[in-house]
Image (spheres, grey):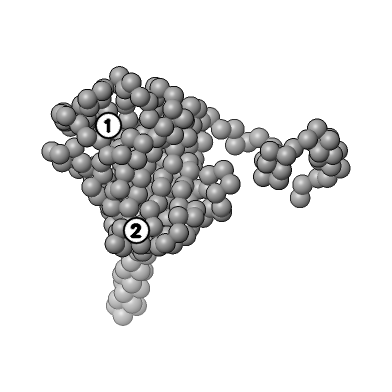
Amino acid sequence: MLMNKNKNNIHNNDQQRSTMRYNRLMICVLITILSFVDAVGQKVVYRIRKDGSFDIVGSAVTIANCYPASDSKMLKPVKLSITKTDSTASITYHLLEGMFELSFSYQGNALVITPFVKNNNQPAYFVSILRDAEVKNVSKIYRTPTQIMGNGGIVDWPVRKMDYSSCGMLTGLVADSGESVAIATRDFNRYNSYINIIPTERNGGKKLLEACIATEGLPPTSLPAFYFTQNKSAFTAMQSEANAIATFMKVKTDKKQSYHWCSWYYTYYHLTASMLSDYLKGFKSVQPE
């Protein structure tokens, strides 16, 4: 009897240990799933006001009091039209000459804001979907340098200088927690886009931002949309959006590494045929590391 009782106790203990291991495993799996969903399934949302302004709201980062502009001047519409459906919305700013429209939609976990300009007799050089919008709960930015505008990477929000405050292609707003909102136009076939970070000293400590498209004065047809996505970490947010840009632009990521050189950074307007010949001879004699 004693032996059978011991066997039963051992069997029950084994079952309890097995059940505990299974429960721990299920908890780990659940945590992993929830972390994955939290990382890739977060959605940035928008809130439109009756006056045509709007907010862009993430789980940690908010871009408040957004309003469009043309050539750095806020729009002054004579009339506003706001339409909404379950998943989309649009704001039409009726101007004295033409109209400016912003449409809001979702693509996957991305908030998509698409500008449309019509019947404007004086095409703008810069079309801004938002200007002087206040960024909240953000301490750092991830910047992609434009042309010869300094280095890229994560830096503090500028205080005084405008140096390196213009960001191209892909920009990140990084909260203290690390949660980040990525902003980008994925279509670079016709136009370049910029995110301008305004130093806080100029605005009483406020962190203001502009998101604009450079048209170079050409009639703005089929302007690219801005995509707003977010993630738990700056690296993952930037990497995910970079992959989305590459997919949209059909970038061939499996091609062999290539290297490029631009005479402008070295000689500006002073390049001569003789200098170019010397450069070409030099290129043939070196191999990049």
Q: Secondary structure at mark 1?
A: strand
* Residue appearing at x 31%, y 74% in the figure: 9
| Amino acid type of the residue tagged 1 in the rendering | Leu
Q: Which residue is identified by label 2?
A: 202
Q: Tell me, for residue 102, which label it has, or none.
A: 1
Q: Is residue 57 visible?
A: no
Q: Residues within 10 Å of mark 2 (few under 14, many from 20)?
A: few
Label 2: element kind = helix
Name the mark nearer the viewer: 2 or 1: 2
- For this rendering, which residue is in front, 11 or 103? 103
Res. 146 mark? none
Residue closest to the eye, 37 or 256 = 256
**Residue 289, position as x, y percentages in the image:** 76, 50
Whether residue 191 sits left or right of residue 280 in the image: it is left
**Quick check: 272 left or right of 62?**
right
At horizontal 45% and vertical 59% (from top left) the residue drawn is: 161
